[in-house]
Image: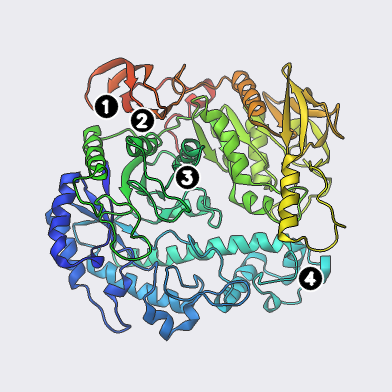
């Protein structure tokens, strides 16, 4: 188990470096991410280079038995870069420049930025690729975290090139974007600009491509640095740090280029769904490279500094949150940062070594954590441990949250609601693309799959036909990969699978917000309209009980499906709310609204019963979470009361045999318990990996 933190010795005088190494050893640290924001120290001027201090730090760490994840230091250019080359600065949608004084103040498409960054990476690689302390390469840092989109001239030129490669001809682009609407037809690629400030909404098909382009430009920056490292002889793993479900970057496209997936995760103590949301993030990261352990590169030892309010962590929470990552496949646990900064924007952010020193609760927590991680030894790799797969797709995310839809949809929030219904039952979930639906799961959950590619639809159909259970809807199978309606209406790809004909969206709205409906609403009126829409619900009866749904009450008609629930109020009263359809050897459920919490729980309970899905550990006490990676079962008591969990195996830390595991509040146990066959369908896939 790797254990450590970001290390920024360039922020501190050399006199403390030896103390850092000594205290790292005391805390159990065996790896640090080094030099992430050190560009200005390494290259204080264009023709001036200083590696002597970095040589000293790396040698001290190596002598102390601490490995180095060496950063390429390209995430924050020094002031001389933009002063000399202003074309490297990014631009917002109104044409105003972003300026230095923070971080990420570079245009990802800028050839000048890429040239300067490439020279820095080349020199670092040639100097340290063979150093025995360097065991990994940290490219950039949190790509796109603060600068989601750049509208500069560099982006304009790169966007035109990207579109030319994608479509070949301007006629093909016009067809894909539907530019005959609003007289948007282009005569040549040089007429196209980034979606800069406009009077009203941009063409949604062009916005989808713009988001693809933005993600690809960030990825190109990573790949350019990766190629330089490889050309210089680097043989160590190369990667960068993801940020969980981060909308601007399609991490599923990035994942094949990462030798190991790394992630930054900062659960908000004030979030009532903190445990669920963090579990989803860790399952997403694990699922991006199935069967391969990943690394948690950043988390907080205590409080962060960048939310409106920043409470610290309760005693035991640090271990409990860390255990979530280990349970879901992490083989590296790291923090931002090692020594708390004494200046700068993040000086109030907690660290492994706080300002108050080693006589602190934080220091006690990180040293105890280091000792427990060391006691775990080698852990099994994450295998095919889930019977359930949840579809989460970036392109769908981008498209479904575009403007001018029947209702506003928060795709991540709805996905988390479905995920939470399984998490509450202790059922493990993989997070997949639609195209991966047929890889041995018993149940696939595909909520709000508005944009559906033909390859994804085919995989989903095969999955059901081969005996799997699918649940999908609402607002699913509406547009193609260009965000255009397909010929034939809606549910054109999955209609036969779900046994339905789709007529209308049935958006739910609350009481009228007033006004003529013409022109732009004021900010207050817009907020009132959204609040009113959020109050709109539709009632339906399911399994003998009355429930409600929100967002939409779709008008769908059974062409072969059995109606399990019908709407009891509104325009759709009497029509199907939940259906079930046999298709091949499997079955497909459709939910024509977004169920409220109790309704969703009832639907998931029925799905679990129908599909034969089982929890990791049965009869879990309230507040206890269980997850499996191979033969390792991790138990976490997030509750405020002691709990007793019945599970047989061997305590991974002590080697003692157990049949029942007592857990104090925030208590954690790692139990080696042999894997049982998940199901006849999944058995042949146990331990397998897919793309």
Q: Residues within 10 Å of mark 3 (few under 14, many from 20)?
A: many
Q: CA distance from mark 2 to mark 1?
A: 18 Å
Give the labeled residue for mark 1: 652
Q: For the point 34% across and 66% down, which residue is it?
A: 344
Q: CA distance from mark 4 to mark 2?
A: 58 Å
314, 21: nearer the viewer: 314
Give the labeled residue for mark 4: 184
Q: Is the Cβ of the residue at disc 1 closer than 8 Å to that at disc 4?
A: no
Q: Residues within 10 Å of mark 2 (few under 14, many from 20)?
A: many
Q: Nearer the viewer, mark 4 or mark 2?
A: 2
Tell me the element at label 1.
loop
> Mark 2 or mark 1, which has the lower sequence index?
1
> Mark 1 or mark 4, which has the lower sequence index?
4
Residue 420 seen by the camera: yes
Rendered location of residue 664, percent (x, y): 33, 24
Q: Is the Cβ of the residue at disc 3 closer than 8 Å to that at disc 2?
A: no
Residue 438 seen by the camera: no
Q: Residues within 10 Å of mark 1 (few under 14, many from 20)?
A: many
Q: Nearer the viewer, mark 3 or mark 1?
A: 1
């Amino acid at each position: 188990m790797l254990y450590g933190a970001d290390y920024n010795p360039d922020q501190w005088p050399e006199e403390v470096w030896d103390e850092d190494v000594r205290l790292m050893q005391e805390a159990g640290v065996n790896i640090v991410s080094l030099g992430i924001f050190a560009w200005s120290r390494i290259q204080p001027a264009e023709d001036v280079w200083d590696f002597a201090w970095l040589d000293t730090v790396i040698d001290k760490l190596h002598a102390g038995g601490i490995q180095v994840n060496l950063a390429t230091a390209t995430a924050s250019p020094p002031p001389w870069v933009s002063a000399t080359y202003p074309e490297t600065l990014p631009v917002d949608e109104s044409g105003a420049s972003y300026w230095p004084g923070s971080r990420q103040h570079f245009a990802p498409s800028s050839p000048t930025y890429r040239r300067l960054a490439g020279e820095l990476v080349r020199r670092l690689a040639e100097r340290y690729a063979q150093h025995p302390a360097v065991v990994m390469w940290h490219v950039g840092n949190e790509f796109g975290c603060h600068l989601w989109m750049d509208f500069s001239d560099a982006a304009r030129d790169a966007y035109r090139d990207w579109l030319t490669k994608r479509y070949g001809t301007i006629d093909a682009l016009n067809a894909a974007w539907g530019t005959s609407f609003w007289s948007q037809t282009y005569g040549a690629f040089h007429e196209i600009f980034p979606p800069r400030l406009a009077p009203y909404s941009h063409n949604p098909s062009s916005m989808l491509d713009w988001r693809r382009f933005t993600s690809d430009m960030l990825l190109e920056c990573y790949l350019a640095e990766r190629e330089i490292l490889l050309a210089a002889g680097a043989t160590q793993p190369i990667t960068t740090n993801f940020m969980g479900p981060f909308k601007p970057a399609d991490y599923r496209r990035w994942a094949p280029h990462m030798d190991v997936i790394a992630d930054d995760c900062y659960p908000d103590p004030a979030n009532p769904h903190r445990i669920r949301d963090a579990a989803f993030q860790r399952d997403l990261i694990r699922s991006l490279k199935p069967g391969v352990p990943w690394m948690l590169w950043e988390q907080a030892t205590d409080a962060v500094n960048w939310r409106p309010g920043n409470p610290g962590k309760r005693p035991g929470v640090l271990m409990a949150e860390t255990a979530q990552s280990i349970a879901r496949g992490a083989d590296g646990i790291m923090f931002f940062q090692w020594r708390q900064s004494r200046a700068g924007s993040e000086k109030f952010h907690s660290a492994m070594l706080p300002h108050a020193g080693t006589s602190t609760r934080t220091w006690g927590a990180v040293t105890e954590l280091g000792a427990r991680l060391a006691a775990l030894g080698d852990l099994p790799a994450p295998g095919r441990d889930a019977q359930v797969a949840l579809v989460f797709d970036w392109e769908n995310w981008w498209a479904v949250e575009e403007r001018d839809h029947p209702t506003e949809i928060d795709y991540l929030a709805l996905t988390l609601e479905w995920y939470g219904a399984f998490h509450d039952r202790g059922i493990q979930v993989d997070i997949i693309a639609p195209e991966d639906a047929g890889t041995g799961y018993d149940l696939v959950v595909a909520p709000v799959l508005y944009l559906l590619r033909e390859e994804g639809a085919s995989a989903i159909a095969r999955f059901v036909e081969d005996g799997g259970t699918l649940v999908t809807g609402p607002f699913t199978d509406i547009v193609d990969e260009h965000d255009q309606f397909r010929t034939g209406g809606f549910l054109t790809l999955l209609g036969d699978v779900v046994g339905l004909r789709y007529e209308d969206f049935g958006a739910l709205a609350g009481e009228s917000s007033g006004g003529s409906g013409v022109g732009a609403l004021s900010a207050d009126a817009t907020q009132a309209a959204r609040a009113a829409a959020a109050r709109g619900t539709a009632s339906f009866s399911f399994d003998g009980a009355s429930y409600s749904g929100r967002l939409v009450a779709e008008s769908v008609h059974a062409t072969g499906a059995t109606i399990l629930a019908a709407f009891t109020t509104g325009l759709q009263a009497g029509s199907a709310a939940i259906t079930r359809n046999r298709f091949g050897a499997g079955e497909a459920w459709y939910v024509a609204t977004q169920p409220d919490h109790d309704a969703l729980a009832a639907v998931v309970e029925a799905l679990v019963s129908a599909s034969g899905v089982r929890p990791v550990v049965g009869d879990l006490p309230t507040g206890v979470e269980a997850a499996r990676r191979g033969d390792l079962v991790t138990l976490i008591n997030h509750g405020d009361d002691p709990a007793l969990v019945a599970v047989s195996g061997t305590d991974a830390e002590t080697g003692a045999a157990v049949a029942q595991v007592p857990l104090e509040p925030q208590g954690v146990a790692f139990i080696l318990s042999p894997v049982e066959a998940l199901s006849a369908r999944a058995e042949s896939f146990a331990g397998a990996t897919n793309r």
